[in-house]
Amino acid sequence: MTRPVPNQSPESISGEDVYVELTSLSKKLITEMLVRMIESAENYHSWSLSDQDGARMIKLVKHKQRIICSSFAFQLNQHFAEFKSDNESMSREKGARDWQRLGLGANETAETDVLQDITTRYHDAFREFDQTILKRLQACIKRSRASIYESPLQVKRLCESFQYAIDSLNLQANYKIALYNLFADRFIESLGPLYRRIDRALIDFGMLPELPTASIHLRSSDGLSESKAPSTIKLDQTACQLILLQRYKEKSRAQSSQYKNLFPELKQHFASFEQNEYDEQIDQLNLMFKLIFEDEDLPLPVKQQLARLQIYVFITAIQEDGFLRRSSNPARRLLDGIISSEVEIAKGSNPEFSGIQFIREHIDDLTSRGFITVDSYSGMLEDYRTHLKEQEIAIRKARKLEATRKVLPLVKSRLSEITQPLRIQGTSLILFEKVWLPLMVQIALQQGMDSDPWHKTIAMVQKQVWSLIPKSSIEEQQELQVALPNVAHSLHRAMRSLKLAESLQQSLRDYLKLEQQDVVEKTARNIIEAKRKTRSLSAQSFDTMEDSTEFDEMMQTGVFQIPGDMLEAFNSVKPEKPKKINQVDSLTIGEWVNIMQDGQKQMGKVAWKSEDDGLFIFVDRDGKRICEVDASKLAGQFESGEVSLIDSGTTDSEKTRFSFMKSL
């Protein structure tokens, strides 16, 4: 192709017209590149697919060539229009990783990683072209400010256009990833001539002619790939070279607070042995590590560790044909992956997320080997990324644990004040330990102990306490009858919001039902017998009964669902469960025992037990509560003989009578 010469002089054509001409030229050149890429797919052998799937992919892209090219051109035209309209100039991130904002969802992580890797991989190589072309495009439309990631011709935007083009093919993720790799190796790798053509056209049209033409760094002048592949490089295993390389390898094995670029010295040593066939590799690696060591954002400990890989990357480069010419080579990906992650961590507010300890340990392992294969770099990068994710999860989990340990005593103290009347009358606090305490801890951590959700929850806990205290007057009895179903409903809401196990929820609902039945019966007896023993406890409760509607609505939103790590943190600071003997462990609901009370033996049936076997309620043959006892005390009663199991064969008539009374 030959570059079209403008029909008008630079002085007579407007910037708007130049922009239109350049848009048309770009679409034409890029379409031709896409066609060449698709036609060369038959000779592409890096699909990461089976032979059968690779053949199917080649057939598909050739059949859909027209759709791919037209869709790509349409999206590219949209990018030029967006750049001209300047609608997103201040909103678009000045980074290359926010693919979710560009249409890829969270469930397409593999695709996101590949596209992100492509944009990161070619960022440095095309940096000068990105800046130069961007300035000339701004001059066309007189746009004052713009990010390089808004340029329609930047690698990221081209990747977006290709992603849009193949999205209409409705391919599975692995097929899309294969096409992304083809796009990187056959299209992005050949962008050098396109960029030079665009840059030259803008100069000819008079757009900032004083700005020098751009160039590609670390690559050949014709693009990212050499036009002619060099002959296979093999290391000359002379004694001098082996001794020289071994000396550098020994230095790399040792930990050091110092680091330096080894390649100038290495080149000088090889020259002294009249060996210059490796100058190309040395020069490329020299520039690569120079940029790493001069990066002010990269922490010093990371530079110290990456410096130890210099000689190993060099050995791999001279043993693997075309290793450095492949932009996707694992060593470069490893370095880029570590650098980008560690710089991002260093700039953030969580420096403890750094993987420097992992890097140090794995480089120790790599340098202890006799040689490093290409797969070694890929394996380390994969393990490094996994380590960062796991470490972040572990650190956040530890933070939640520490926060829970700090706030738990404060919440327990406040709950203890509210539930004091129940402790005085001997009522178990299992509902408050299993439900209200975890909920209050979660709200304290999320919202604080002076928030509206906290005060609503406190009011609901107070209402729960009030409803478990027997009353002494008709007015209180009527108020209790209204409150009981509301309390039960609010407890259900709280348990569901906490995502408690369904079996535990059912167990606690049964317990509350028994407690409420007991309160109702005692209230009726107090009124009939005109007893005032519980008046003092009732007086310690709460005079006003607030409506629970607001609390129920708050729980309905589910904002206080405790995650698994929070529950683990909460449980880790709770006291251990008491050890119980086998008889307590084996007790089931409905089982009968003999209980000694006031010197008399009485039959008792297990009417309820907590899910963790920590609390038991016994009733007599008429269904009236005999006692409520925790597992530790019950174990002691079994050992002393105060409680004993009853042989099922001797109690059939008693059980029949109980069932009959229950039916009545």
Image (spheres, grey):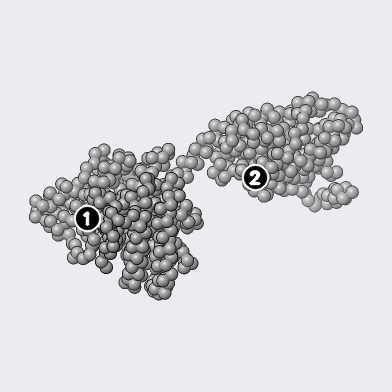
Residue 536 visible? The answer is yes
- Which element carries disc 1, helix, strand or loop? helix
- Amino acid type for the residue under numbered disc 2: Thr
Q: Nearer the viewer, residue 344 or 509?
A: 344
Q: Position of residue 658 (x, y in %)?
A: 85, 48
Residue 358 visible? The answer is no
Q: Position of residue 489 (x, y in %)?
A: 74, 43
User: First in sequence: mark 1 or mark 2?
Assistant: 1
Q: Position of residue 435 (x, y in %)?
A: 66, 40
Give the residue at mark 2: 557
Q: Is residue 518 above or below residue 1?
A: above
Question: Where on the picture, by quarter, is residue 163?
Answer: bottom left
Between circles 1 and 2, the one closer to the viewer is 2
Residue name at image x 26 percent, y 42 percent:
294
Q: Nearer the viewer, residue 204 or 193?
A: 204
Give the residue at mark 1: 315
Residue name at image x 77 percent, y 30 percent:
544
Q: Is residue 556 left or right of residue 169?
A: right
Residue name at image x 23 percent, y 61 percent:
222
Residue name at image x 48 percent, y 41 percent:
396
Q: Is residue 599 left or right of residue 492?
A: right
Q: Position of residue 18 (x, y in %)?
A: 33, 57
- Amino acid type for the residue under numbered disc 1: Ile
Q: Nearer the viewer, residue 430 or 2?
A: 2
Q: Is residue 630 left or right of residue 407?
A: right
* Tag 1 near tag 2, CB within 8 Å: no
